[in-house]
C-alpha cells in the first residue's frame, strides 16, 4: 500500500462513507477475455467497479491495491476494472498484463459506463454490497485499506 498522509486517508474514508442513492441497477459487461459479468451473478459478494485509463496517474497508483482486494478471498469481493479512453484493445490488454492485473478488465465506453452511473473523472469507483445495492461511489483514487475499512464497518465478510 502506498504511504499517504493521514489527512488523505481521512478524506478518502469520508468520501467512501457517503451514502449513495440506492437503486436496483443491473449491468452487463463483457471483459477482454469474452466473459460476461452481471451484477446479479455476484449476489452474496461485494462488487467493486473501477473506471480507469492507462494514462491516468491516480488510476495506476491504485491498481496494486485493487489487485490485493480482488485476490484477498477474506473480503468476499470481486473487482471489475473498466478501461476508458483508450486507443485500442491491444493497448489495454498489454498494459493490464504489464501491471499484473488479475481481475477482469472490461473495455468500456460512455454507453457501458451509463449502466453503472456517471463517470465524471478518472478513476471513478462504485461499490455494491452483497445484496446488489450501490453503497458508495468515489471519484478519485481509492486504497485497499479504505475499501476494507468500509466493508468491515458495514458488517461485511472478513473471514474465509
Image (tube, rainbow, N blue to C red):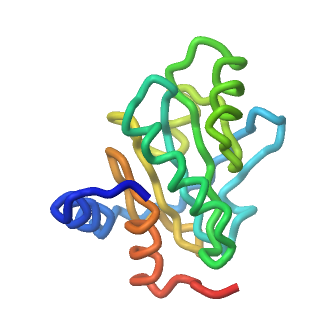
Q: Residue furthest top?
A: 87
Instruction: Give how far across and how far down residue 143 sits, in percent.
Output: 41, 58
Residue at 69%, 73% (x, y): give it. 73
* Nearest to the observer: residue 60 or residue 136: 60
In the rendered structure, the answer to whether residue 111 lies left or right of residue 119 reads right
- Quadrant of the image for the N terminus? bottom left
The part of the image, by quadrant, that contains residue 132 is bottom right
In the rendered structure, the answer to whether residue 55 lies left or right of residue 139 reads right
Residue at 71%, 53% (x, y): give it. 38
In the rendered structure, the answer to whether residue 94 lies left or right of residue 82 reads right
- Quadrant of the image for the C terminus? bottom right
Position of residue 33 relative to residue 153, above or below, is: above
Instruction: Give how far across and how far down residue 40 sits, in percent.
Output: 70, 62
Q: Residue furthest left?
A: 7
Instruction: Give how far across and how far down residue 28 sits, in percent.
Output: 69, 45
* Nearest to the observer: residue 42 or residue 152: 152
* Nearest to the observer: residue 82 or residue 59: 59
Residue at 32%, 45% (x, y): give it. 140
Residue at 66%, 44% (x, y): give it. 101
Instruction: Give how far across and how far down residue 131 sits, in percent.
Output: 59, 75
* Nearest to the observer: residue 153 or residue 117: 153
Q: Residue furthest right?
A: 34
Q: What number of labels is visible? A: 0
Amino acid at each position: 500500500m502506498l504511504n499517504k498522509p493521514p489527512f488523505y486517508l481521512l478524506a478518502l474514508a469520508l468520501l467512501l462513507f457517503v451514502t449513495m442513492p440506492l437503486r436496483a441497477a443491473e449491468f452487463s459487461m463483457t471483459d477482454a477475455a469474452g466473459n460476461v459479468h452481471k451484477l446479479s451473478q455476484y449476489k452474496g459478494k461485494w462488487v467493486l467497479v473501477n473506471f480507469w485509463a492507462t494514462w491516468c496517474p491516480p488510476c495506476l497508483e491504485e491498481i496494486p491495491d485493487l489487485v490485493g482486494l480482488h485476490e484477498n478471498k477474506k473480503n468476499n469481493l470481486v473487482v471489475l476494472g473498466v478501461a476508458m479512453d483508450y486507443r485500442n484493445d491491444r493497448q489495454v490488454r498489454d498494459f493490464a498484463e504489464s501491471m499484473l492485473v488479475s481481475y477482469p478488465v472490461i473495455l468500456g465506453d460512455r454507453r457501458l459506463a451509463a449502466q453503472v452511473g456517471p463517470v465524471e473523472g478518472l478513476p471513478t469507483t462504485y461499490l455494491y454490497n452483497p445484496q446488489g445495492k450501490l453503497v458508495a461511489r468515489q471519484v478519485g483514487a481509492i486504497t485497499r485499506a479504505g475499501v476494507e475499512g468500509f466493508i468491515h464497518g458495514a458488517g461485511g465478510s472478513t473471514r474465509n
